[in-house]
């Protein structure tokens, strides 16, 4: 390992890494525009040009996951590097082109710079360097980059059906170079009410879909207060938030339709059924009290995930980062939700969330990542692979 680290400085080119990140940002992969194919093919070609075979695993038309397996020079464990290809829509209000990938003041700007194309670039580049070093490790390194993380996790749902396993996994979400050992789970739901359209100047019946939904929202706000009374010692409080609402067709027409979306953050011990039943109970009470029909659609549930602070994987990761950066990394909780439950819960793989960039930069205008963190992250990934796979 010592010899490999000495050689690493010969092959490692920070400018090459940052150019790779800029190019990834320049390839628009906004979701829900389902445009991940272009970035998937670019990554596949980049790996192929550097002697690494990569496969496209098609989730649906235009949406392939990328999978590459790099075998070490002797038998041993398997380490999986994971990240997502999609980004949220850029939206308006940027002071620069959101797909420029421009470098300014030691920062790279653009949609996905922090969340999470910097993590992708660091993982991809670490694999290129390990290949140039002659794969000086045991076992196998798997690169797995999935589509549709920002919406419904179709890429991960496809992946867990495949016969691919690992002993350890790292997800390179933006953690400010801290080691995240847990995050809250999430449930997503749509609730709909119906009414009867008529001219607003002559309302002859009280059948307004938005008024009905107001009763639902009031009850959900009360449920949220109850949810927040439960505190997890690691993850804190759960929550229920109404995040979207739409309804009606014109200002002078009584609305015959209203729909809301709910974001439900869940803790350890919360299950898909327990959270669903809690919500159904409240909606049934509203339905009976106000004599209205309410339709519920459940379209996503990810459980909370944790790995022990004392797990050997966490200890090794901590040791590698401390020896390289000469300071102890924080061991903390990831505030957002990511693909970790698919790996840790569904696949049983010990999983850490670690990467360059700040979550505060995710999903905002003029998103950026500090170049120093990107360079550090790539070097950490190389060192972690050499440590874990030996």
Image (tube, helix red, strand yellow):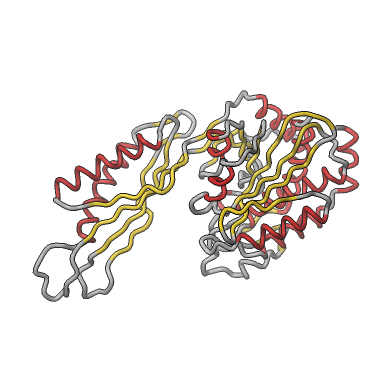
Expressed as whole percent of the image width and height from the top left, the position of residue 292 reads: 17, 53
Quadrant including the C terminus: top right
Label tally: 0
Residue at the image point whose x is 23% and y is 67% from the top: 255
Expressed as whole percent of the image width and height from the top left, the position of residue 85 reads: 62, 54
Instruction: Identify the image quadrant of residue 203.
Output: bottom left
Quadrant including the N terminus: top right
Out of 45 and 55, give the one closest to the viewer.
55
Q: Compared with residue 174, is residue 79 higher up or lower down, i.e. above or below?
A: above
Apparent side of residue 89 relative to residue 253 in the rendered image (left or right): right
Q: Compared with residue 255, is residue 288 higher up or lower down, i.e. above or below?
A: above
Out of 334 and 284, give the one closest to the viewer.
284
Residue at the image point whose x is 28% and y is 71% from the top: 249
Residue at the image point whose x is 65% and y is 35% from the top: 165
Apparent side of residue 387 relative to residue 28 in the rendered image (left or right): right
Residue, far left:
204
Expressed as whole percent of the image width and height from the top left, the position of residue 109 reads: 65, 61
Instruction: Identify the image quadrant of residue 46.
Output: bottom right
Instruction: Identify the image quadrant of residue 349.
Output: top right
Residue at the image point whose x is 77% and y is 45% from the top: 126
Apparent side of residue 309 relative to residue 131 in the rendered image (left or right): left
Expressed as whole percent of the image width and height from the top left, the position of residue 236 reads: 44, 34
């Amino acid at each position: 390992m010592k010899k490999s680290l000495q050689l690493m400085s010969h092959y490692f080119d920070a400018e090459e890494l940052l150019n790779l990140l800029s190019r990834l940002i320049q390839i628009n992969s906004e979701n829900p525009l389902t445009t991940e194919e272009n970035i998937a093919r670019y990554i596949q070609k980049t790996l192929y040009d550097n002697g690494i075979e990569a496969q496209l695993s098609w989730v649906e038309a235009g949406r392939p996951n990328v999978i590459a397996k790099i075998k070490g020079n002797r038998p041993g464990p398997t380490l999986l590097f994971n990240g997502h290809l999609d980004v949220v829509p850029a939206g308006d209000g940027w002071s620069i082109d959101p797909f420029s990938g421009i470098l300014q003041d030691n920062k790279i700007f653009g949609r996905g710079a922090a969340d999470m194309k910097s993590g992708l670039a660091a993982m991809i580049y670490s694999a290129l360097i390990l290949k140039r070093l002659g794969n000086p490790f045991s076992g196998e390194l798997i690169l797995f980059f999935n589509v549709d993380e920002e919406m419904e996790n179709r890429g991960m749902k496809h992946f867990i059906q495949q016969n691919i396993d690992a002993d350890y996994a790292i997800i390179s979400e933006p953690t400010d170079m801290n080691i995240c050992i847990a995050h809250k789970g999430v449930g997503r739901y749509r609730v709909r009410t119906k009414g009867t359209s008529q001219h607003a100047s002559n309302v002859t019946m009280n059948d307004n879909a938005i008024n009905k939904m107001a009763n639902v929202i009031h009850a959900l706000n009360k449920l949220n207060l109850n949810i927040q009374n439960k505190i997890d010692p690691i993850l804190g409080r759960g929550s229920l938030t109404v995040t979207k609402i739409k309804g009606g067709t014109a200002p002078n027409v009584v609305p015959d339709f209203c729909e809301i979306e709910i974001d439900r953050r869940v803790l350890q011990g919360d299950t898909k059924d327990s959270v669903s039943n809690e919500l159904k109970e409240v909606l049934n009470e509203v339905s009976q009290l106000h004599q209205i029909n309410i339709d519920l659609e459940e379209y996503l549930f990810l459980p909370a995930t944790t790995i022990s602070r004392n797990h050997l994987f966490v200890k090794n990761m901590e040791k590698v980062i401390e020896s390289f950066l000469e300071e102890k990394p924080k061991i903390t909780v990831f505030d957002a939700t990511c693909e970790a439950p698919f790996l840790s819960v569904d696949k049983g793989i010990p999983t850490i969330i670690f990467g360059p960039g700040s979550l505060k930069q995710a999903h905002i205008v003029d998103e950026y990542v500090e170049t120093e963190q990107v360079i550090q992250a790539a070097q950490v990934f190389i060192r972690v692979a050499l440590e874990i796979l030996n």
